[in-house]
Image: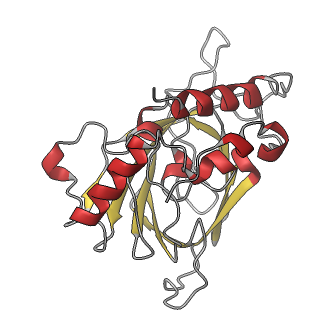
Amino acid sequence: MNIWPAVLLATAVSGHLSAQWLNYPTAGIPRGRDGKPNLSAPAPRAADGKPDLSGVWMADGQTYFFDLAAGLKPEDVVMLPWAKELQQKRIDNEHGDDPLSRCLPHGVPRINTNGLFPFKIIQTPGLVVILYEQLNLFRQVFLDGRKLAKDVNPTWLGYSTGRWDGDTLVIETTGLNGKAWLDTQKSRPATDALHVTERFRRKDFGTLEVVATIDDPKTYSKPWTTTTQKMFLQLNTDILEFICNENEKDLSHMPVGK
């Protein structure tokens, strides 16, 4: 029986639903003649004229959290033999060795895909900060023209720089430690050679579209790009503290994987 996704789902729901008491009006929301929010209105602009991605967002469902390659053909995502073997071992182990089951970070781009926890984007001309409610994680995306660092201490979320391509924010991330999984149910691996390119586009006031390209020559025979995932603006709320270990009751019973 494949219990890990269900366990993860139950944990996530119990963490976020208890936070629904928070209800503070979101400023600057466009409204129709009936006074209701008009989230199909044009995306706002920052003072520098760039699209303003600021706000509290949440992925539309769990599809990409469980399967990052959802909507792609098998020939689009081709693993090297060792990676395919590792993936099957993880699945046979019922995903019990997923680092996230031990309250360790999701990695990139998986961190954006959990449709049960919101994340908050704070945008300035030279820096975008992304705050994630689940596990209290954060990312810094430097927009000041610096290059991706070549010799950095590998981390779970890596080192990110960004640039604007028209109305799309392009985020390049390297310096990842290779310990995180790309998705939950499919259990796809990655290594420290992973280079992730994310494209964030605010389609309208209430919708953020995200596409990720996976380039890991140690794991996949060629780069591959996800289909478009939608994130929806969360009104009248904010992210809250989430301490995973306080809610973790099963850690001592988890199987030890490889």
Q: Where residue 111 sits: x, y (%)?
A: 56, 50
Residue 240 shown left or right of residue 215 in the figure: right
Look at the image and tell me whether residue 187 can be seen: no
Residue 98 seen from this side:
yes
Of residues 212 and 170, the one drawn nearer to the viewer in this rendering = 212
Q: Is residue 137 above or below residue 2?
A: below
Q: Residue at x 85, y 41 (%)?
A: 246
Q: Position of residue 244 (x, y in %)?
A: 77, 44
- The tally of labels here is 0
Residue placed most toward the observer, 185 or 61? 185
126 or 218: nearer the viewer: 218
The image position of residue 231, as x and y in percent, is 51, 37
Coordinates of residue 144 in the picture (x, y in percent): 58, 79
**Residue furthest out toward the left:** 75
The part of the image, by quadrant, that contains residue 27 is top right
Quadrant for the N terminus in the image = top left
At 54% across and 47% down in the image, what residue appears? 112
Q: Quadrant of residue 238?
A: top right
Report whether 241 appears left or right of 135: right
**Residue 77 to residue 220: above or below:** above
Q: Residue furthest top?
A: 34
| Rendered residue at 19%/57% (across/down) | 78
Identified at 22% across, 53% down, the residue is 77
Q: Nearer the viewer, residue 30 or 64?
A: 64
